[in-house]
Image (cartoon, helix red, strand yellow):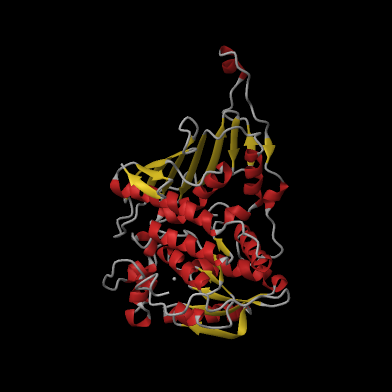
Amino acid sequence: MENRREFIKKSALAGLGMSFSAGSYARILGSNDRVRVGIIGFSDRFRASLAPAFMEHAKAQNFAFVGVSDIWSRRREEAEQFLKGKGWNDSSFFKARNNDELLDRKDVDAVIISTADFQHALHCVAAVESGRDAYCEKPFAESLDDARKAVKAVESSKRIVQVGSQRRSAPNYHSANDFIKSGKFGDITMVEMTWNVNQPGRWRRPKLVSEIRKEDTDWDRYQLNRPKTAWDPRKYLEFRLFYPYSSGIPGQWMSHQIDTVHWFSGLDHPRSVVANGGVYSWKDGRVNADTFTAVFDYGPDNDKTKGFQVLYSSRMNNEAGGVKEYYYSNGGMINLDTNKISPDGGLEAKYAKEMNMQANMLPTMSLGEAVKMETSANTGGDPMTSLHMLNWMGCVRSRKEPNAPARVGFNHSVANIMATTALHTGKRVTWDAVKNDMVIS
């Protein structure tokens, strides 16, 4: 989001072409040591938000960019020039042709991973098994196998990994979480979420598609553990439109919002989901839906009498409604668009009296002045990402758990993958917490 509104051990992972030994590097950082950070994937997201957010705090935290890994030669050159132009790169900045080259080096302490959606989990495994901490963009994973490998690798490595769910570092979301957890809000009865745009060019890169050449990149390495196919520049550059490289709307947008449901409710996964959608407007060869709706059932696995519903909808052909997050209880609602708590929809006295009940109306109040989320410098990074990056930097030094550890990334991936599976199969998908797996019914 640019702002509030739009806000792997060869044996273990065969076919990834990685040759380093697990735990091959792990420098013990002193309080005055510079943390040397490598960039894995010079993406639009990195350029627009991650790099500015990093640099906003780099001097104070003594962090520095020291190199980049990207399998497209053009991106390596662009990364060097972009950082050099802003005075953001180390004097000995290196350009690695792939992650093997970067992770084989001894002058990299941590990495920022901003590659294609389906690559995040396996690139995170590679980083932590080589002894590096990581900031890993969301979605954490686009398949359950990848998600399981990644969370196991992170939690057994004891490395610091921050998943890019930046809402977990935003003061207004912390205020909402605190209010709900206090009991003053009451039980969550319903959550409604939307993410609407009217952008036929969203996730499209036609100019770059016409310019990229297979010989300038590494198509086999790019595909990792996905089925091997012939060279396709669209799947390389417009991956968000093509499954199984991305789930599209769930992985890109829903992952942010469904994560807050897990956070606020204390529940790790939905009990079930049904979904529908399709390519209704943008007939440009894409596979992933331009319109998508999912209905989730959330609640404790051992008590089906308790729970609530989450309605998520997103369309790319009409932006009315924009990005919305509404939490409802019997007493009112929390609107995370306006950052207000209100009695809207609460149980009014006249209806309560009919059933010998008491009215239930929340007070009208703000989530607090902290929602301004002001940062110390206007470097072009969005405020939530800036705070999230700062939290990761602090945890790299303190070795404390960051706001969005790998486990929460695993959890949002479960919800995303369940919803994507429901969409593709047309069936209701449930989660078996004992088997730690989906059930398609």
Residue 307 in the image: state x and y as whole percent.
49, 34
Q: Is residue 157 above or below residue 106?
A: above
Q: Nearer the viewer, residue 367 or 145?
A: 145
Residue 130 in the image: state x and y as whole percent.
51, 75
Judged left or right of residue 287, residue 265 is right
Q: Which residue: 65% across, 30% down? A: 362
Q: Which residue: 33% across, 82% down? A: 215
Residue 166 in which image quadrant? bottom right
View extreme (left): residue = 230
Q: Is residue 279 above or below residue 136?
A: above
- The answer to whether residue 280 of the structure is visible from this angle is no
The C terminus: image quadrant: top left
Q: Is residue 162 above or below residue 313?
A: below
Judged left or right of residue 265, residue 70 is left
- The answer to whether residue 190 of the structure is visible from this angle is yes
Residue 100 in the image: state x and y as whole percent.
45, 80
